[in-house]
Amino acid sequence: MNFDLTEEQKMIKELARKFADEEVAPGARENDLYARFPMDLPKKMAALGLLGGPIPEKYGGAGLDYICHAIITEEIGRACSSIRTFTSAQVSLVEISILKWGTEEQRLKYLPPLCKADIIGCFGLTEPNAGSDAGSLSTTAVFQKDAWVLNGTKTWISNGGIADIALVIARTGKEKHEGLTAFLVSKDAAGFSTKNIENKLGLRSSNTAELIFDNCKIPRDAILGGLGDGFKIAMSALDNGRFSVAAGCVGIGQACIDACIKYAKERIQFGKPIGNFQLVQDMIAKMVVDTEAARMLVYKAAYVKNKGLKSTLETSIAKYFASEMAMRAATDAVQIHGGYGYSNELPVERYFRDAKCATIYEGTSQIQKLIIGREVLGLKAFE
Ligand code: COS
């Protein structure tokens, strides 16, 4: 057991922290207010290697381990969960899935431009009638003459409206799981359009959209993995996406701690800084313990991923705990800031609105608990 970060991990933390403070945090309030995604940021992140962390250098990535990936994601999440959401979709859901399931040709075609932010990716699983029950999706892909033809609608897709390629799971057969296949769909494919989803509670500067396939034709070789591998690919993508959500939530916890320590020392009531009061210290102490525990769970999942092992259990534990922790921390952070915390002049109300989504997307807290139950009991609650 060694809790020390390596020199490389410390360097990455420093780099990501500086970038988050200088490039991400300053625009976060306005981007949230006007619900706009800062299109200049992906290239800036890519220039520092922040968009290809765990991707090997031969495919244009930084070749870093999963602790580094967690550190980068935490730091971005500390500054802005919308940008962290963009990063999670780009790196964890799309890049790592192509690395794991793609042919060598697909890796060489897609990974370098994704790592450089020359192209943006999104992951299309959820549908209006298929959320938690991901295997029940109804978007179809039928092979006709020399091409696949997709029909259906995906919804709540992060990066959907700004993506150049979409990793889409569609039905190619009747079987619930083996009847699903993954495809890489270009935004230029005929019959493919998107529609932005507006007025979200949080993550307002992250782009969220519907993907609409209306007799959308894509080439024969647009399949990722094999015919019928779609459900497995989706679940393995989520094992990575959820890890990244968990790491981002550690960032929210840390941001709450930082904001509360500063405010509790400045704000004077009853003649002294409110940080002197035991009930305020109680909230801050709980935040510190909660955040540190979540960070350790994320690092534990990273440790398993570094060994190349299946990390479904560790990832769901980390995602469940970290997202609920972020919600607790942000609730208390607003409380400590009182009336000021209820206004968007200070960032804690944004942390609060953003944290809520983390307990819902990439599998609700309830789904994470049922996955944990399935993994430890060997019994499925879904049958
Ligand atoms: N990695 C690889 N393969 C996996 C996997 C994983 N993590 N989890 C499951 N599979 C494969 C297995 O092959 C499994 O078959 P076996 O039981 O024979 O091994 C098969 O998929 C079916 O798994 P399961 O029976 O558990 O599937 P269910 O349809 O019951 O669904 C849940 C399981 C509910 C866990 C799944 O649908 C889920 O994660 N839902 C939430 C979806 C979600 O997060 N949506 C939000 C997306 S926002 S991007």
Image (cartoon, rainbow, N blue to C red):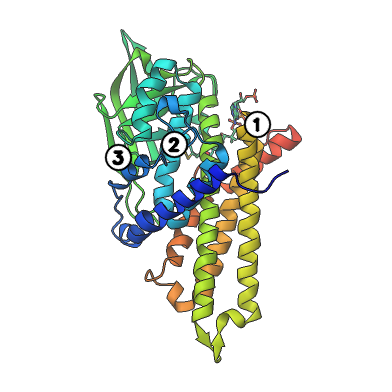
Task: State which mark lies toward you, 3 or 2.
Answer: 2
Q: CA distance from mark 3 to mark 2?
A: 15 Å
Query: How many marks are shown on the rendered structure?
Result: 3
Amino acid type assigned to the residue bearing label 2 in the image:
Val
Circle 2: is it few (<14), some (14-19), or many (20+) Cα within 10 Å? many
Question: Residue 383 shows which numbered tag?
Answer: 1
Is disc 3 in contact with disc 1, using a CB cutoff of under 8 Å?
no
- Establish whether ligand 1 lies closer than 8 Å to the Cβ of label 3: no
Q: Earlier in the sequence, mark 3 or mark 2?
A: 2
Check disc 3 and report the residue beneath it. Answer: 162
Q: Where residue 30 sits: x, y (%)?
A: 31, 61
Task: Give the quadrant of residue 202.
Answer: bottom left
- On residue 87, the disc is none
Q: Is mark 1 within 8 Å of ligand 1?
A: yes
Tell me the quadrant of the picture where the C terminus can be found: top right
Element on which disc 1 rests: loop
Residue type highlighted by circle 3: Ile
Query: Is residue 293 found left or right of 234 in the rendered image?
Result: right
Q: Which mark is residue 91?
A: 2
Q: CA distance from mark 3 to mark 1?
A: 37 Å
Estimate how packed mark 1 is, as few (under 14), some (14 to 19) or many (20 or more) residues with alpha carbons within 10 Å: few
Residue farthest toward the right in the current orientation of the protein? 377
Give the amino acid type for the residue marked by disc 1 in the picture: Glu
Query: Quadrant of residue 279 in the image?
Result: bottom right
| Residue at (51% x, 26% y) in the render | 233
Please say if 194 is above or below 254.
Answer: above
Residue 127 visible, this angle: no
State the residue at coordinates (49%, 77%). 338
